[in-house]
Amino acid sequence: MHKLIKNFTLSVNNLTLLMYLANVIFISLIFNNPYITIDIFICLITTSWLVRRKKFVSFLKASGLIFLLTLLFNLVINQNGADVLLKIPFVTISTQSLTNGFILGISFLNILWSFYIYDALTHTKLIFEILSNVFKSIAIIFVLTVKFIPKIIDIFNDVRQLYKFRNSSPTRDKGRINRIKQTMHLNEIVLNKSISNFMNMSDSLISKGYNQRRQSFVHETNKVSDYIMRSFLTISIIFNLVMLTKGIGQVNFGSGNVDFRFTWLIGIIIFLNFIAIIYPILIGEFHYLWWKSFISKTTASNIPTAQRYR
Amino acid sequence: MIIGETGSGKSTLLRQLKPELALGKATAGKLTLFNNDDNNDFNRVAYISQFVDNQMVTETARDEFHFVLENMGATPEMIHSKIAEIATYFDIVDLMDLKEEELSGGQKQIINLATALILNPEILLLDEPTSQLDPITSEKFFRMVEKINSDLNITVVLVEHSLEQAVYYVNRIILVESGQIKMDLPTDKALRKLFEKVDYQAYIPQTDRLFLEQQLDQNFPTLKLPLSNRRLSEIVSQQYEYLHYRDHVGKDDQPSKVIFQVKRLNFRFEFNVPNILDDINFELEQGKSYAILGPNGVGKTTLLKVLTKQLSALNGSVSINGQNIKKMGKEFFDQLFVLPQNPALLFVGDSVKEEISYQLQQTDQKVTDELIQQYLSTYQLENIQDVSPYDISGGQQEYLALVIGLIKDPTLLFLDEPTKGLDPNMKQKVANLLVSYQQNGGTIIANTHDVLFSTQYFDYVALMFDGHLGKFEPPIKFFPNKYFYTTEINKACRDYFPKALIWEDIIKNES
């Protein structure tokens, strides 16, 4: 995680962070106007790169592939448009269907990248607590899912490897049916093994008093930065909701045409959403400049933290 | 401390003491806390299981403390002060915001302990808490438990499969046998009583065993057990002229055919990190056993995975009978068997019987019910034949997995922590299986923390650290050269008997 984003996460509490993430996902879901979509895409990619670099390249490759598939799928199902560029059997590609597919592909990527940021910044405990206040059993399913999907994948990989040392039957791997049977058997084995892990976690929940949970709301300490950010996010959500109900920033994909008109309202949406997505970078940068300009010069401290910021 | 054979009901008994976690329903009897029927609030009892990895519900220690305190309805101020107290007491301030995957096994278990204690319990139940930790980390953990016990006056009930380390920290020992309490005595008396029972002599720590076996208690009748190494050293110094050394560890060192060769093997998980396996070279001879020792996280399991093609080496070569394993297909997997750290990963059936039956089906034999029964009887598994392999105890799982491996009869047997969770008698059973496999020409390579087991049953041992594997040497040459990484008997008696490694090595002179 880049130091600017890290600084931002330290300056606000988890509830504010969750609100920011919900707003980012909301923005990615509702707009598909070309200007807004591309603006959102650039902001999301920049923020994602700073939020988590470790998985960035592999996610970029996967999202590139998904973009291509979405584009091709859209070219096949949406063959409207007068300005024909290419005609092959069963498929007619026009400028309109191509731009339509391109924008739809980018919109889809925006959703994926917003979840990438969510995954990197989200705080499992907070969501678990919010859920447990509403639906206790769903909260348990949530925590089991979050904890055990990676664990089940590990178990699957280990079992697949170790199975080779047990299964030395002469009929091994012979014929497709046998292979399918073996894969099904393997999946059953993995599920059996995962259940024992589930049981251990259930014991842990009981011994930690979850079954007699007394607290009915989430405790977070709010600072000024939390109030400022939440106020801004509330304005952003209300504004975007109004735009959504008025149909501004939306494109009718069935029309066979993409509306490229740029109005002042589109400009405002672009500006506001730009701020809403890169808010962590802006705040991190602001804090960094403040530190560089004033604090680090006034402290004579030689502790590693102070040195890092000089 | 509650001890007993693998599967004797120790853990079941412990869980009964925390009714929310009890397995099944009590058919008779009553559970009261501190002889007070009116105040049976079992929130005063905390429990920690042996499964280090599945105990944290949230992502970090800080969240975990919040979670527990919020469940109890604590106010934000109370949460803040409680966390401050517990983090300082356990010295885990630096670990508070680390994610679960960034913590070592020992750190996780300390956090689990801190989480259990944050609600000020009066009784702490520990179910084999160190079974997944290396000996050094285990000792640190026990020291922490002892500090809690003496500082905070908390009653600790500990279930353990071995007395070797924990015995120095407990006041009473309870023996459970077939679901019944057979003995409940103060530590000193309990150790002497166990010595009288032939079946439980193996439970006694090596230093105390030497003291009792050589009847040194007659010369030192007031001494209380367990003996520290320093105390035993004093005794040996006083009794030196009446004792002598006889080797019980050295084995026949006849060279045999090299069947497994590793040359210049390197491996790392990421591009810009040091090699986890750094230029590893060794050879294994047929019919010999090799133990790799070393603390957690030095790459022992990674080495085993690379050697068995579960991970791909960065470079270097591994060959079986002169054939490079990269060029081998299914025949590679047919010649090997791997017993992983978690033996349950090997199971494929719904019962122990099915496991045996499945493995027999992989051989050329015609599998009949009689044949299965014959194997179940040979390996003394009849009693648990219909039980799910996931429901038997950790020690029984380890044993069953080894039996499966021996039915396969591979050329090479790879074992990852084969004695983890085994009681001393079960260890002996496992050792017997390994010895007979070896006598039939099988070769064994094992990762282990168990210094005593590797001394008694392995032909060669080597130490792994920083990605390097030291030279394989016979235990009789390897351990006497070590200062810290050696047996307790060697540590206690090396000034007088430098080659003594196990209690049998020191014998009283015949008068």
Image: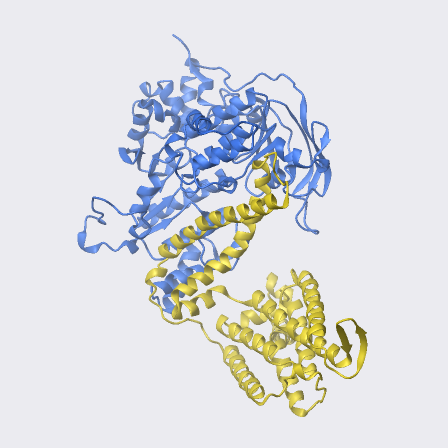
- Residue A174 versus residue A51 in the image, above or below: above
Q: Which chain is yellow?
A: A
**Residue B302 versus residue A140 in the image, above or below:** above
Give the side of residue A290 with respect to residue A233, left or right: right
Q: Which chain did the renderer colour blue?
A: B
Q: Please state which of residues A189 and B319 is positioned toward the viewer in this rendering.
A: A189
User: At which x and y percent is residue A55?
Assistant: 65, 61
Residue at 36 percent across and 30 percent down: it is B226
Q: Residue at x 56, y 20 (%)?
A: B440
Give percent across and percent down for residue A121: 56, 67
Quadrant for residue B240, please give it: top left
Image point (71%, 89%), residue name: A261
How has the structure been colored for display?
A: by chain
Query: Looking at the rendering, which quadrant does residue A207 occupy?
Result: bottom left
- Toward which corner of the image does residue A141 lie, by quadrant? bottom left
Picture layout, residue B288 above or below residue A170: above
Residue B419 visible from this viewpoint: no
